Image (cartoon, rainbow, N blue to C red):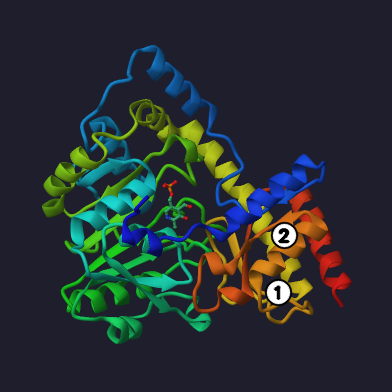
């Protein structure tokens, strides 16, 4: 049977092979530690679950408007005021099926076939694939360790082409967890504005930043900026599939039209459930969990460094540590997939190979997702130590 040609450009996650392998090993009775999956291990807060159940019981199972519940937009707008001191009009907010839906919606809004968008390498792999799905292209810019793998104005100048419409960056980043400073973000925005381009900022990991690191939101940078966010990570609602875009006003009617046609509406019970997350006791619980993630990062980062992993970009947020394995004494220190497969087979520890995130240096990087408690991380570190010693 014939498939669309663009499917050739859409790759599966390499980590899925690892996951399948991990499942088989688990079925055989092996004890597997999972540090590969990029979602919080915490369940959704109880108030959110109760809110979802209540919505279902009240028969709130019908479509909402295509851009979402006005009450939820209002709450999100208020959240920007309280957290960031940023005034965001609720009319600028479009609720979507996850950040994934938001990214696809914005890309479909802005890009014609053949046009290009600058992306970071390393970066979130789905970006170039949803662009391929609308016959647009991502230009993978090999960002540098000395810049914390952030896209710089110089790189914008170097990689910009006639058909480039702008750039998409994530801060904090997946896979590095590093945060773009206000100065970096504004310089990037300036470089893009000079070229009449558009800046898309994926702020999905914004709530998850540690040790006094404060990310800076681009919501009010100007009329050429789209901010993408989600209830998945900080709010621990991955499975509810709910996110949002903060768009410039001029774009909202067209986003509405597109959302009507692509999604009809975001998930209704999920939107009612999400109304609960802004209550003070829920926020207090989310902040407590954030403290847990911080403890895990504070434990794991120095331990990995002691074992010889090099972590060039300071992880300050998200759930990840992106580690260079090329200095390790291991036969596969230049082959991250084989390194991860050996680690899984020999020690039952699952991590993600860098090739899922980077074309440029992915073969000698791996990503750790600290989605287990510190005692489990301690066990993971001792397994890693044995793994590396055995390979000497
Ligand atoms: C950087 C980034 N953006 C977007 C997404 C999509 O998230 P969701 O669709 O669950 O909101 C993810 C998921 O891991 C991510 O890491």
Q: Is residue 216 above or below residue 148?
A: above
Seen at 33% across and 86% down, the residue is 154
Relative side of 170 to 321, left or right: left
Seen at 68% across and 75% down, the residue is 325
**Label 1 vs label 2, nearer the camera:** 1
Disc 1 crowd, CA 10 A, few/some/many (<14, 14-19, 20+): many
Which SS class for mark 1? loop
The foreground one among 14 and 368 is: 14
In the rendering, at what x and y percent does residue 223 appear? Answer: 16, 61
Relative side of 297 to 137, left or right: right
Disc 2 crowd, CA 10 A, few/some/many (<14, 14-19, 20+): some
In the rendering, at what x and y percent does residue 122 appear? Answer: 48, 71
Q: Is residue 149 above or below residue 104?
A: below
Quadrant assignment, res 68: top left
Which SS class for mark 2? helix
* Count of numbered tags: 2
Seen at 26% across and 31% down, the residue is 69
Q: Disc 2 marks which residue?
A: 299
Q: Is residue 65 above or below residue 101?
A: above
Q: Disc 1 marks which residue?
A: 309
Is residue 217 visible from the viewing direction of this image?
no
Is residue 243 visible from the viewing direction of this image?
yes
The foreground one among 133 and 292 is: 133
Seen at 20% across and 64% down, the residue is 113
Relative side of 61 to 328, left or right: left
Residue that sits furthest to the front in the current view: 1
């Amino acid at each position: 049977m014939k498939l669309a040609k663009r499917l050739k450009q859409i790759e599966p996650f390499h980590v899925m092979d690892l996951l399948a392998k991990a499942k088989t090993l688990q079925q055989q009775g092996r004890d597997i530690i999972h540090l590969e999956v990029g979602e919080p291990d915490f369940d959704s807060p109880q108030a959110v679950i109760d809110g979802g159940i209540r919505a279902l019981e009240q028969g709130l199972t019908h479509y909402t408007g295509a851009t979402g519940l006005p009450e939820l937009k209002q709450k999100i707008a208020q959240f920007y005021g309280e957290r960031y001191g940023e005034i965001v009009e609720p009319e600028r907010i479009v609720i979507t099926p996850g950040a994934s839906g938001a990214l696809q919606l914005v890309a479909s809004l802005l890009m014609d076939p053949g046009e290009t968008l600058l992306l970071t390498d390393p970066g979130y792999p789905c970006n170039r694939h949803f662009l391929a799905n609308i016959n647009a292209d991502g230009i993978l810019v090999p960002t540098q360790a000395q810049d914390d793998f952030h896209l710089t104005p110089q790189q914008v100048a170097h990689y910009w082409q006639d058909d480039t419409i702008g750039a998409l960056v994530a801060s904090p980043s997946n896979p590095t967890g590093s945060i773009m400073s206000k100065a970096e973000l504004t310089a990037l925005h300036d470089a893009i504005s000079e070229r009449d381009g558009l800046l898309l900022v994926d702020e999905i990991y914004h709530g998850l930043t540690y040790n006094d690191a404060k990310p800076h939101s681009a919501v009010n940078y100007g009329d050429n900026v789209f901010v993408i966010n989600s209830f998945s990570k900080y709010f621990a609602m991955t499975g509810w599939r709910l996110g949002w875009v903060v768009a410039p006003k001029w774009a909202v009617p067209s986003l509405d039209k597109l959302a009507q046609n692509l999604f009809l509406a975001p998930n209704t019970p999920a939107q009612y459930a999400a109304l609960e997350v802004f209550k003070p006791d829920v926020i207090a619980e989310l902040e407590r969990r954030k403290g847990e993630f911080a403890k895990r990062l504070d434990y794991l980062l120095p331990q990995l460094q002691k074992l010889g992993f090099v972590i060039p970009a300071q992880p300050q947020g998200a759930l990840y540590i992106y580690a260079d394995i090329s200095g390790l004494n291991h036969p596969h220190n230049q082959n991250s997939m084989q390194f991860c497969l050996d680690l899984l087979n020999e020690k039952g520890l699952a991590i993600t190979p860098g090739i899922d995130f980077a074309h440029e240096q992915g073969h000698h990087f791996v990503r750790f997702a600290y989605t287990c408690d510190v005692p489990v991380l301690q066990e993971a570190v001792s397994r890693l130590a044995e793994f590396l010693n055995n390979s000497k």
